[in-house]
Image (cartoon, rainbow, N blue to C red):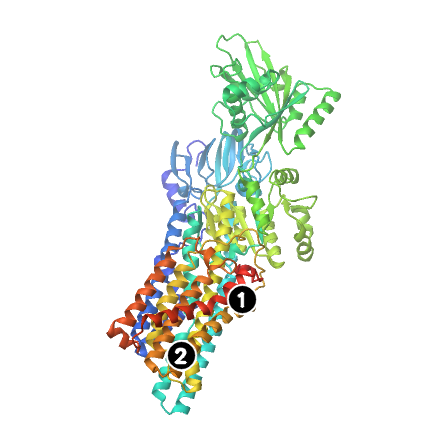
Amino acid sequence: MSALTGLSGTEAAERLQRDGCNELPAGRKRSVLSIAAEIAREPMFLLLVTCGMIYLVLGDVREAIMLLGFVVVVMFITFFQEQRSERALEALRDLSSPRALVIRDGIQKRIPGRDVVSEDILVLAEGDRVPADAALVSCMNLSVDESVLTGESVPVRKTSCSGDKEMPRPGGDNTPFVYSGTLVVHGQGIAVVRATGIRTEIGRIGTSLQSLEPEETLLQKETRRLVQRLAIAGLSICVLVVVIYGLTRGNWLNGLLAGITLAMATLPEEFPVVLTIFLAIGAWRISKKQVLTRRVPAVETLGACTVLCVDKTGTLTMNAMSVKKIFAGEHFYDLGSIPGSSPEHACSTFPEDFHELLEFGILASKRDPFDPMEKALRQLGIQTLVNTEHLHDDWTLVQEYPLSERLLALSHVWKSPDGRDFVIACKGAPEAIGDLCHFSAKQSHELGERINVLAGEGLRVIGVAKAAFTLSSLPGEQHDLDFRFLGLIGLADPVRPLVREAIQECRDAGIRVVMITGDYPGTAVNVARQIDLPSGDAIITGQELDAMDDAELKTRITAVNIFARVVPEQKLRIVNALKASGEIVAMTGDGVNDAPALKSAHIGIAMGGRGTDVAREAASLVLLDDNFTSIVAAVRMGRRIFDNIRKAMAYIFAVHVPIIGLSLLPVLFGWPLILLPVHIVFLELIIDPACSIIFEAEQEERDTMTRKPRDPGEPLFSMKAIGLSVLQGLSVLAIVLSVFAISMKRGQGELDARALTVTTLIMANLGLIFVNRSWSRTFFSTLSTPNPALWWVAAGTAAGLFLILYVPFLRDLFHFAFLHPIDIFICLAGGVLSILWFEIVKISNVRLPQHLR
């Protein structure tokens, strides 16, 4: 390879075949079959399929078809959501394989970044994404944004390589190396590729993800335990019913029928349906809030999170610069009132004493800047210097004095159209500018005081100076020019809009926000102050973190909200320490340095706009608009989903109590069988849509974002809540048994008594749906909250009830007698009476479990 011609096409092809493509390590893309297999392996789905097959073997085709139909519907919804998420994530890929400009066969060629190989010669310029780790053989004023690897928002300066040096870790100024995935913000350079793909720094961090396994969510674990317990209990009772019926009545066939009926009533099929449908549709609802769900169960966990770990750069801040405060002529000027004003107003309010400072700050920058600092200067100039003589778009750039290790300042030499004089604009580190202006000790001390004022506000400070030269040839060094000091410019990395409000909402919701950044403590504290993040003096730096053992970290982490100068491995350790303290941890981030912590956290939340592929694939959720406020919307939706799951399960507990009672008590006391399998099928046609549609569509409760997160150690459904649900069911059971007993005592016959009892149960079932929509608002107050599915189910139930009561064929199939209008009124009154007490409890404002209020 020649330093001028680069690799030949043949050599590049051979290296590509030998080393593989220049791509980041990524999670293996899930195929259609793999997604379907993951869904089918879920124990809840296996339970549903098994139940359906058992019903087929027993000849109960209707129940089997209904149950297996639900399996198909749920699998379709989940599969559709997973596929949709995968396609959206594919569309977000814009970092891992950028295009690259290389020299091959002596010609500059633009090729896909994945085709870059070792020993390729890269041509780098402003705005380029570095496609591979490389050593600089030459560069001019090259600055690179390495925040994707280090978390540092300020670009670092680069120099050329003087020999075959070993590549160090990224970070720090004046290194002769550039790294894959970083961004060139200033200057240009030529570099020789040292490493590609997984051998790069970005790839090395990515491979650490493979040692971390995603955790099963709490809801999955708790639901599985609940289903197992109910299934075992139901099976035991069913066997008991068959034995008791056979021994006491001698009719084992009817005993088997009674056992099957009870099995159909007690099998916990609704629980996995509720879990899967609520989370799948919830993920779809969250996507409307610009949050893409990569792993559906994380929706539930998000609603329970207690700690949100936030990376500062690019998440809380915009990773951009804006001029906030300037100093000239012994005076400071705060530009807080300038942004957003009209150019005419800004020009009229910007003091004349500061015009020259800004003028030469712009002259010391690129005409079409890419660097965020120079962009800020240019934008302010357009706002404040319009229609003045201080903008010089017609001047010609003659020469540039670049930054150097010895002098952290650069100068641009301009020639005006008349060509009489050279005008030199210089900007850089304030100390370097003072040196060029030949400051005395007193002047340097005064300059230091001015710098401290700006730095104390968390600003990046640069100095600006000017010089003039009349000779035909320019001097070789900036020190040979006679500079005059003009002033200081303080720039801030702006906080994202509405972040302060979003963090306040998190605080109201009992969610602790922790800032984890690679930036300096002073900058982190300043950002924390801007967003009202409580910090005090409690800050832990990366160096302090290294000196702590796990026990000390676990103790101190409960009172610290800011971690500064942290490297990727330390972020992972912080997340693990929070988890060890019993917290439910959500972690946001956009860089590769965040990916290990994203995957280790209970909920990883990646930024979709500027995030890396590795970060997105490690995360459970992706913010499509990179808006921090979307996290709050996701938390709100997650809590709503979890509340609605609990409402649905409260209803399931309540409605199954009378069904089980009406199936079990006649066997124990020698009564005629009240419920037959066909009745259970009809009731399931009400119960299943109520669980999967009505309660899923319920709006959030009033206190959704003002209550603390659920205690991580609290079960999905507390014993007190279960007790209240069972009490609802027992009240319904008492009423329907009373209807049955009175009917039998009056000699109305088995068919008449069954019709009255089942109709009353159906009415009470609808009542349970209405009262469980909210455990804090009354029936009438919930009517003001729209839920179209509720009325569709109620109307469908009324229509179905009418058919089975008054169509002779169906009435015979259900073993009913004809009911008169007065009978229907009695059934309706019984249904209302069975749930009336719970409405009285709401009105009397008796304290109920918070998560259902």
Q: Closer to the camera, 770 or 586?
A: 770
Q: Quadrant of residue 735?
A: bottom left
Figure check: 708 above or below 540 = below
Identity, as a three-letter code, of the amino acid under mark 2: Phe
Q: What x and y, as percent, mark residue 37?
A: 38, 63
Q: Which comes before the other along the chain, label 1 or label 2?
A: 1
Q: Report the residue that reaches farthest toward the right.
A: 442
Q: What separation in Å lies between label 1 and label 2 (alpha carbons)?
A: 29 Å
Where disc 1 sits, the SS reads: helix
Q: What x and y, as percent, mark residue 626?
A: 48, 42
- Which labelled disc corresponds to residue 563? none
Identity, as a three-letter code, of the amino acid under mark 1: Ala
Mark 1, Cα crowd under 10 Å, few <14 / some 14-19 / many 20+, is some
Q: Is residue 799 left or right of residue 522?
A: left
Figure check: 143 above or below 285 = above
Q: Is residue 456 left or right of residue 838?
A: right
Q: Closer to the camera, 191 or 827?
A: 827
Figure check: 662 above or below 768 = below
Q: Is residue 473 visible?
A: no
Q: What x and y, as percent, mark residue 750?
A: 34, 82
Name the quadrant of the N terminus.
top left
- Which labelled disc corresponds to residue 721? 1
- Which labelled disc corresponds to residue 740? 2
Q: What x and y, as percent, mark residue 833?
A: 45, 69
Figure check: 162 above or below 255 = above
